[in-house]
C-alpha cells in the first residue's frame, strides 16, 4: 500500500467525482496532523478517519454547489449502498407531496397528542 506525505495509508482510490481518492488515517494521527489533513482536503483529497481500523468519519472538501438528487443516488449506487432500478420502474418525484385525505394529518397529530386514543 502506498503512503501519503504524513505516513498514513492511502486506500484504493474510490472516485466520487472522477478525481478524488480516499486516504485513511487513525483518530490519534488525524488529531496530531489535522492541519496537514485539512490542507489535503482543501486540495481536493478525501480522508477516512478510523478507530482501530474501523471507519468512523469522512473529511471531504466542501462542494461548490449541492448535489442533485440523481447525483446523490448515483453515488449511493456506486458505493453499493442502494441498487439501481432496472426495467420499467416508475421514477418517483421526490419533490411532490403525497396525496392524503383532507384533515388526515391533523387527526393523526391530535391522536398522537391524546396518547393514541
Image (spheres, helix red, strand yellow):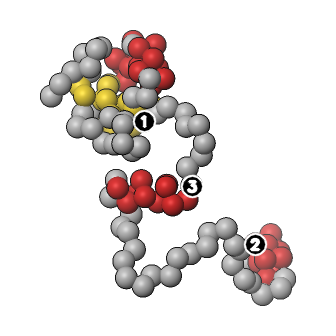
List x then y, in percent, for residue 85.
40, 74
From the viewer's perspective, is 79 left or right of 91?
left
Quadrant showing the N terminus:
top left
Query: Residues under labels 1 and 3: Cα distance?
Result: 23 Å
Query: Residues under labels 2 and 3: Cα distance?
Result: 35 Å
Q: Which mark is residue 57?
A: 1
From the image, tell me which residue sits under label 2.
112
Among numbered discs 2 and 3, the one appearing first in the sequence: 3
Residue at image point 30% right, 42% down:
14
Among numbered discs 1 and 3, the one appearing first in the sequence: 1
Is 23 above or below relative to 99?
A: above
From the viewer's perspective, is 99 left or right of 29?
right
List x then y, in percent, for residue 65.
60, 42
Among numbered discs 1 and 2, the one appearing first in the sequence: 1
The foreground one among 91 and 19 is 19
Residue at image point 41% right, 21% down:
40
Mark 2 vs 3: CB contact within 8 A: no
Is 112 above or below relative to 77?
A: below
List x then y, in percent, for residue 104.
79, 82
Q: Secondary structure at mark 3?
A: loop
From the image, tell me which residue sits under label 3.
68
The foreground one among 31 and 4 is 4
Question: Taking the image as drawn, is residue 53 in sight?
Answer: yes
Query: Residues under labels 1 and 2: Cα distance?
Result: 36 Å
Give neighbour class at mark 1: few <14, some 14-19, many 20+ (Cα, 10 Å): few
Give neighbour class at mark 2: few <14, some 14-19, many 20+ (Cα, 10 Å): few
> Could you say which quadrant of the image residue 57 lies in?
top left
Q: Secondary structure at mark 2?
A: helix
- Between circles 2 and 3, the one closer to the viewer is 3
> Could you say which quadrant of the image residue 11 lies in?
top left
- Between circles 1 and 3, the one closer to the viewer is 3
Q: Which mark is residue 26?
A: none
Amino acid at each position: 500500500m502506498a503512503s501519503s506525505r504524513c505516513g498514513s495509508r492511502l486506500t484504493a482510490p474510490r472516485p466520487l467525482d472522477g478525481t478524488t481518492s480516499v486516504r485513511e488515517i487513525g483518530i490519534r494521527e488525524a488529531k496530531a496532523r489535522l492541519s496537514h489533513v485539512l490542507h489535503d482536503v482543501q486540495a481536493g483529497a478525501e480522508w477516512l478517519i478510523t478507530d482501530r481500523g474501523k471507519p468512523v468519519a469522512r473529511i471531504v472538501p466542501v462542494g461548490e454547489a449541492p448535489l442533485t438528487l440523481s447525483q446523490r443516488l448515483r453515488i449511493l449506487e456506486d458505493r453499493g449502498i442502494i441498487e439501481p432500478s432496472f426495467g420499467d420502474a416508475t421514477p418517483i418525484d421526490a419533490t411532490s407531496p403525497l396525496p392524503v385525505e383532507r384533515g388526515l394529518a391533523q387527526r393523526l397529530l391530535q391522536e398522537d397528542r391524546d396518547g393514541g386514543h
